[in-house]
Amino acid sequence: MIDRVKIGDIEYTVRLERDGEYDGSVTHSIAIIQIAPDMHPIVERCSLWHEIFHAIFKQTGQEDARQNEGLIEALSHSVVAIIRNNPELVEYTCGGHDVQVGNG
């Protein structure tokens, strides 16, 4: 599991710990994402992306989307599958040597 993820201009700390009954949660005010431990590795990744989408929708003012668990589940599972099944897409998106990636 990664320990940090930058979403927009905010760097979130990622912790493997259960927050109540849910497999994951995001606390925007302190920039923490919690993911329940001891899940299947793919479920863990989908849960992380699920919370990332909550954070994206919160940051961009998309309150209707942020509250739409069905949409967030569909996106998180789809993104994980796309990334896992298309590693060349990730490499292309990151730009290899032709694009500089940084803090700006």
Image (cartoon, rainbow, N blue to C red):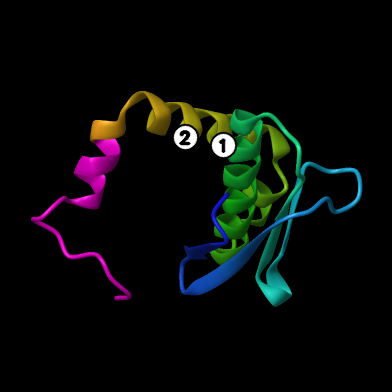
Residue at left 47%, top 34%? Answer: 79
- Judge from the rendering whether residue 34 lies leftward or rightward of residue 79; answer left or right: right
In the rendered image, residue 100 lying in the magenta stretch gets the answer yes
State the separation of the CA atoms marked 2 and 1: 5 Å
Nearer to me, 9 or 64: 9
| Residue 73: percent from left, percent from top | 64, 33
Q: Which residue is mark 1?
A: 76
Q: Are marks 2 and 1 in contact (CB under 8 Å)?
A: yes
Q: Is residue 100 above or below residue 53?
A: below
Q: Which type of secondary structure does the marked residue at label 1 adopt?
A: helix
Q: Which residue is mark 2?
A: 79
Which residues lie in the magenta part? 89-104
- Judge from the rendering whether residue 63 lies leftward or rightward of residue 20; answer left or right: left
Residue at left 46%, top 67%? Answer: 8
Q: Which type of secondary structure does the marked residue at label 2 adopt?
A: helix
Q: Which three-letter amino acid code belongs to the residue tagged 2?
A: Val
Q: Which mark is residue 9?
A: none
Task: Name the residue furthest left.
Answer: 98
- Which quarter of the picture shows residue 31? bottom right
Residue at left 23%, top 33%? Answer: 88
CA neighbours of label 2 inside 10 A, class few (<14), some (14 to 19), many (20+): some
Q: Quadrant of the C terminus?
A: bottom left
